[in-house]
């Protein structure tokens, strides 16, 4: 599972409280901000599963 830009993220907090492991990806540093809308993402933070489902 990956979370993109979790600063102050309620989704990331919920994952932590549920003890669900996840990897943080900085969408800005990774150059993904412009690419995310082409995959249907409309907001950050974006949480996806290991299969790519969001």
Image (cartoon, rainbow, N blue to C red):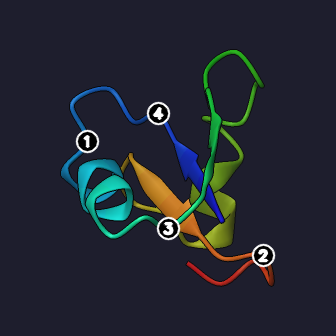
- Asked whether the beta carbons under mark 3 and mark 2 sit within 8 Å of each other, the answer is no
- Asked whether the beta carbons under mark 2 and mark 4 sit within 8 Å of each other, the answer is no
- Asked whether the beta carbons under mark 1 and mark 4 sit within 8 Å of each other, the answer is yes
Q: Residues within 10 Å of mark 4 (few under 14, many from 20)?
A: some
Q: Position of residue 53 (x, y in %)?
A: 65, 84
| Mark earlier in primary sequence (3, 2) | 3
CA gap between label 1 and label 2 equals 19 Å
| Residue indicated by mark 4 | 5
In the rendered structure, the answer to whether residue 50 lies left or right of residue 22 reads: right
| Residue indicated by mark 3 | 20
CA gap between label 4 and label 3 equals 17 Å
| Residue indicated by mark 1 | 9
The structure residue drawn at horizontal position 25% and vertical position 42%, both measured from the top left corner, is: 9
The structure residue drawn at horizontal position 60% and vertical position 70%, both measured from the top left corner, is: 48
| Mark earlier in primary sequence (2, 4) | 4
Residue at the limit of the structure toward the front, as seen here: 19
Q: In the displayed structure, would residue 1 be above or below residue 26?
A: below
CA gap between label 2 and label 4 equals 17 Å
| Residue indicated by mark 2 | 50
Nearer the observer: mark 2 or 4; the answer is 2
Q: Residues within 10 Å of mark 2 (few under 14, many from 20)?
A: few
């Amino acid at each position: 599972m990956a979370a993109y830009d979790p600063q102050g993220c309620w989704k990331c907090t919920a994952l932590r409280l549920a003890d669900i492991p996840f990897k943080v990806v900085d969408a800005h540093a990774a150059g993904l901000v412009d690419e995310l809308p082409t995959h249907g993402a409309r907001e950050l933070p974006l949480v996806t599963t290991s299969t790519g489902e969001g």
